[in-house]
């Protein structure tokens, strides 16, 4: 990550995004796409987008990757991005499916849940946008599908409907 300079995020938010992607995408083993590479995809994507919601994305990352969110939701002290993966998953689980007192608070403040959904979407964009992620998900490009290979791919030759000279 040290050789990459984020385009949309600052370095601290980018580190938080990496932790969020690693937390949100549960591969059940070795990831096909490293979370840093997925975060680069998201950073590049957001740097090209023009939307009034971009500031809300920054705020969502700042809120999740804070010291108070883990403390408040899972009684863990430390920034979200510095916690071990299983601890981060507990925090996210509490955001998505709150229980007890947190359920009452969640009804009043649905923004944390919306932020978690947004971050899950961003994590998915970053992870599955690259070639490794799409292949891992089972996507086969159309050109490589057996049905496509049998098709005649020769360019079609049609007479020019507007010949030079107008006739």
Image: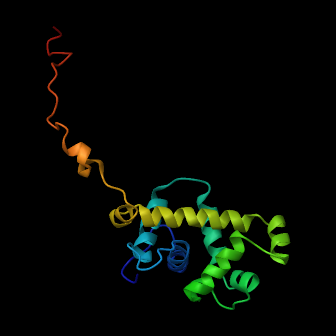
Camera sees residue 32? yes
Residue drawn at x 49%, y 67% is: 8
The colour mode here is rainbow
Q: Residue 71 at x, y = what percent?
A: 73, 86
Front residue of 149/54: it is 149
Query: How many marks do you count on the picture?
Result: 0
> Which residue of the protein is positioned furthest toward the bottom in this rendering?
77
Front residue of 99/157: it is 99
Q: Residue 134 at x, y = what percent?
A: 38, 61
Residue 125 vs residue 98: left or right? left
Relative height, residue 139 to residue 24 (above, below): above
Q: Residue 123 at x, y = what percent?
A: 51, 67
Q: Residue 151 at x, y = what percent?
A: 20, 38
Which quarter of the figure is the C terminus placed in? Answer: top left
Front residue of 157/59: it is 157
- Quadrant in which residue 13 is drawn: bottom right
Relative height, residue 154 to residue 167 (above, below): below
Residue 151 vs residue 5: left or right? left
Residue drawn at x 53%, y 64% is: 122
């Amino acid at each position: 990550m040290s050789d990459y300079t984020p385009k949309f995020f600052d370095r601290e938010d980018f580190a938080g995004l990496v932790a969020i992607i690693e937390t949100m995408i549960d591969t059940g083993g070795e990831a096909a796409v490293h979370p840093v590479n997925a975060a680069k995809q998201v950073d590049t994507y957001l740097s090209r987008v023009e939307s009034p919601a971009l500031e809300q994305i920054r705020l969502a990352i700042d809120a999740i990757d804070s010291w108070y969110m883990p403390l408040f939701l899972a009684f863990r002290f430390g920034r979200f991005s510095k916690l071990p993966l299983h601890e981060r998953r507990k925090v996210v689980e509490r955001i998505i499916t709150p229980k007890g007192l947190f359920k009452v608070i969640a009804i009043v403040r649905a923004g944390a849940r919306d932020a978690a959904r947004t971050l899950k979407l961003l994590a998915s964009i970053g992870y599955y946008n690259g070639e490794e992620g799409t292949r891992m998900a089972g996507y086969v490009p159309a050109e490589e599908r057996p049905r496509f290979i049998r098709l005649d791919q020769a360019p079609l030759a049609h007479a020019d409907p507007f010949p030079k000279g107008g006739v």
